[in-house]
Amino acid sequence: MIATAADYAWFTYGRFTYDEYTDLRAAYCFTLVRGLTPEQVLTRVGARAGDFPLMGLKELIRMGFSDLDRPGSRYGHFFGVVTVGDWAFIVEPNGFMGVLPEIAGRLSAGTRLVSHSLNADGTMEDFLFMEDGQERLSLEPDCPDLVAYTRWAEELDEITRQVGFDSERTSESLFAMAEHLTGVRVTPDLLEHSIYQCGIAQ
């Protein structure tokens, strides 16, 4: 069954005025990298294992939105990572490491990476698909001409057609595109019940 934007309405539209996702919805980056362990992710981005304790989602979000007690926070990218099947799932509250080509290129060496993000003031969304350090798709859906941001226009057209890309529900559509390319469905249970290894990428 092909994912669509409607499958991810739970993330964008919370049931309550405030819940554990409120801050994460405001600014996030979700990245999937095939075949890497959390330890390998830490190594590839220059983070040191053991700098932080294991964290649940709420702790991860709180830390991601706070400069307090976060060594080097102004000079790096704080993230948590957990294994999901054959993939490393990287969660960045208030981050964008996964869509930076220089870091994503290291993470995707010899494998596939799919990442999407929303910036801190909610004005820009990014989507990045890389294989072995090479960009396959790189786009900013808020811009009127999606094709201008990718060398793979036909591939983008096919993916957006398959998932029924909805310009009124961009974030949910990007989740669906990521699932289409990875086979990994992000769910509330996955986010809430995972225990994340954390680090700061340089």
Image (cartoon, rainbow, N blue to C red):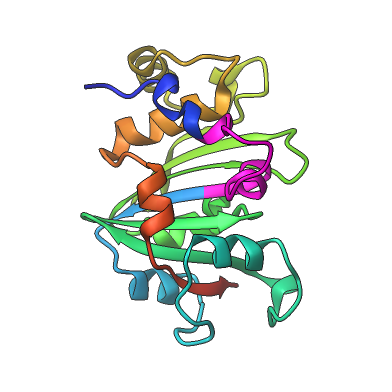
Above or below, comparing residue 191 to residue 7 in the picture: below
Seen from the viewer's position, the closer of residues 20 and 119 is 20
Query: Looking at the rendering, which quadrant does residue 17 occupy?
Result: top right
Left or right, 159 with reference to 51: left
Per the rendered image, the range of residues in magenta is 11-29
Q: Is residue 194 left or right of residue 184?
A: right
The image quadrant of residue 156 is top left
Q: Is residue 59 above or below residue 7?
A: below
Residue 130 covered by magenta stretch: no
Quarter of the rendering occupied by the N terminus: top left
Placement of the C terminus among the 4 image quadrants: bottom right
Q: Is residue 22 magenta?
A: yes
* Residue that lies at the very extreme toward the front in this rendered image: 16
- Foreground residue among 1 and 72: 1
Q: Can residue 97 be seen by looking at this rendering? A: no
In the rendered image, is residue 126 in sight? yes
Q: Residue at x 49, y 70 (%)?
A: 45
The answer to whether residue 150 is left or right of residue 7 is: right
Seen in the picture, residue 147 relative to 126 is either above or below; the reply is above
Q: Residue at x 39, y 25 (%)?
A: 7
Residue at the outermost bottom position:
50
The image shows residue 49 at horizontal and vertical percentages of 44, 84
Q: Nearer the viewer, residue 57 or 2?
A: 57
Q: Residue at x 65, y 64 (%)?
A: 62
Relative to 112, does residue 139 appear above or below in the rendering?
Answer: above
Q: Position of residue 102 (x, y in %)?
A: 55, 58
Q: Position of residue 128 (x, y in %)?
A: 49, 40
At which x and y percent is residue 57? 50, 60
Looking at the image, how many numbered discs can be counted on the residues? 0
